[in-house]
Amino acid sequence: MSADRATDERLDTIETLLSHLQHDVDKLNEALISRQTEISELNRQLTKLTSAVDQIPQPPDNPLDERPPHY
């Protein structure tokens, strides 16, 4: 009977550890999904900002070619 009891205790310990590991995996999965959502939003914002910056007129390479503001 002692061997059965020791086996049961080991099994209980393994099941407890497995339960904790499953909880940790679930929490990591939630964090991963949250980060992916955040990354997707940041990529969308970056694309929008890049497009806005691309539409800003660039000054001429040579300042002498620039027209004065009163023209």
Image (cartoon, rainbow, N blue to C red):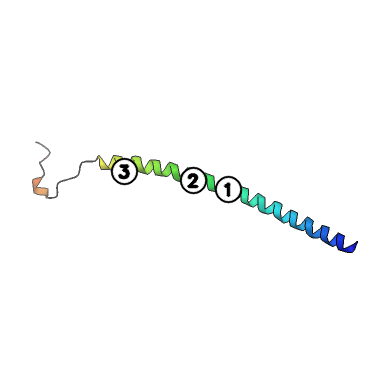
Q: Farthest residue toward the bottom?
A: 3
For the residue marked with disc 1, what is the amino acid?
Answer: Asn
Q: Which residue is mark 3?
A: 50
Which sits earlier in the primary sequence, circle 2 or circle 3?
2
Q: Relative to 6, does residue 46 appear above or below in the rendering?
A: above
For residue 29, which numbered disc appears in the image? 1
In depth, the one of 62 and 25 nearer the eye is 25
Question: What is the distance, in whole Å, between disc 2 and disc 1 at their CAs?
Answer: 10 Å
Residue in view at x 49 percent, y 46 percent: 36
Question: What is the distance, in whole Å, between disc 3 and disc 1 at their CAs?
Answer: 31 Å
Q: Relative to 27, does residue 13 appear above or below in the rendering?
A: below
Question: Which mark's residue is nearer the viewer, 2 or 3?
Answer: 2
Which sits earlier in the primary sequence, circle 2 or circle 1?
1
Q: Secondary structure at mark 2?
A: helix
Q: Farthest residue toward the right?
A: 1
For residue 36, which numbered disc appears in the image? 2
Question: Which mark's residue is nearer the viewer, 3 or 1?
Answer: 1
Question: In screen coordinates, is 59 left or right of 17?
Answer: left
Question: In which quadrant of the rendered image does the N terminus lie?
Answer: bottom right
Q: Relative to 28, does residue 48 appear above or below in the rendering?
A: above
